[in-house]
Amino acid sequence: MEKIKVLIADDHAVVREGLRKLLEEQTDMEVVGEATDGLLAVKKVKALHPDVAVLDIAMPQLTGLEAVALIKEAVPETQVVLLSMHIKDAYVHQALSSGALGYVLKASPTSDVLEAIRTAHRGEHYLSSKINSKLISTFLKGKDEKPAESGYNLLSEREQQVFRLLVEGRSNADIAEILCISSKTVDKHRANTMKKLNIHNMVEMVKYAIKIGIIGPELWDE
């Protein structure tokens, strides 16, 4: 039987070790790599092409939420499962919108992690039992409807990536390196984003990001 190749990304060694031990005990899984931050996770996914990447939602360099979109853009066949302490609907919706198939609460039993990996590998969505199951149906229904004529949905995928990195406090140089584009291109995306959202400065951009749930203080409490 061909095993599910899994990459683990978490900035806490004890979590990575625990996940590795759990997964290696499964007859249908093997750990092919580990990463200590979001940026390294993206690089390792590009190099290793795992079937499933299990990402902590709060990591240095790039958060799990930021890494999902970059992973799906670079290696579409790799499915992503996010681990989080938070049940906030906005985070779950952003995870699904970015391309993740699984969202597992860290307080969940280990069986949830295993089921999420197997389910994601089949190309299906999985949420921890404590998360409102209506979220997935609402999200999937929304994908089939016409996007809003204004706001965040008007931004291109790249503009959304630049937006998220900007409100995280990244410099143009950092964003250029992370996305493998020039600083001039970052400036262009930034200008387009502000024009589409009718935002005039970074303070307004951050307030908007908080309002729609892109960022929030809870994300850095993990």
Image (cartoon, rainbow, N blue to C red):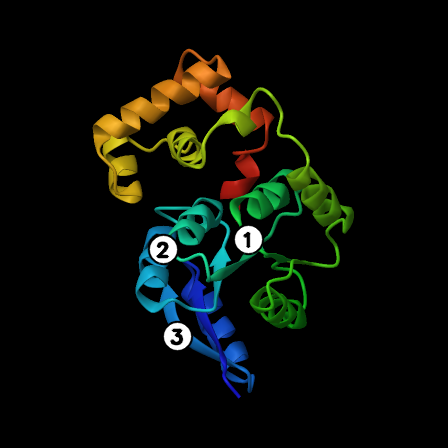
In the displayed structure, does residue 176 sit left or right of residue 32?
A: left
Which disc is residue 32 wearing? Answer: 3
Q: x and y percent of residue 73 in the render?
A: 41, 49
Q: Amino acid at mark 1?
A: Ala
For the point 54% across and 85% down, the residue is 25
**Mark 3 Cα shell of 10 Å, populated few (<14), some (14-19), many (≥20):** some
Q: CA distance from mark 3 to mark 1?
A: 19 Å
Position of 177 with respect to 24 (left or right) is left
Left-right relation of 145 to 31: right
Which residue position holds label 2? Answer: 42
The residue pinned by badge 1 equals 100
Q: Amino acid at mark 3?
A: Val
Q: In terms of sequence position, does the residue under pointer 2 or pointer 3 come before the other?
A: 3
Q: Amino acid at mark 2?
A: Val
- Indicate the secondary structure of the residue bearing disc 1: loop
Asked whether the beta carbons under mark 2 and mark 3 sit within 8 Å of each other, the answer is no
The x and y percentages for residue 204 are: 47, 16
Q: Depth check: give the residue in front, 192 or 80.
A: 192
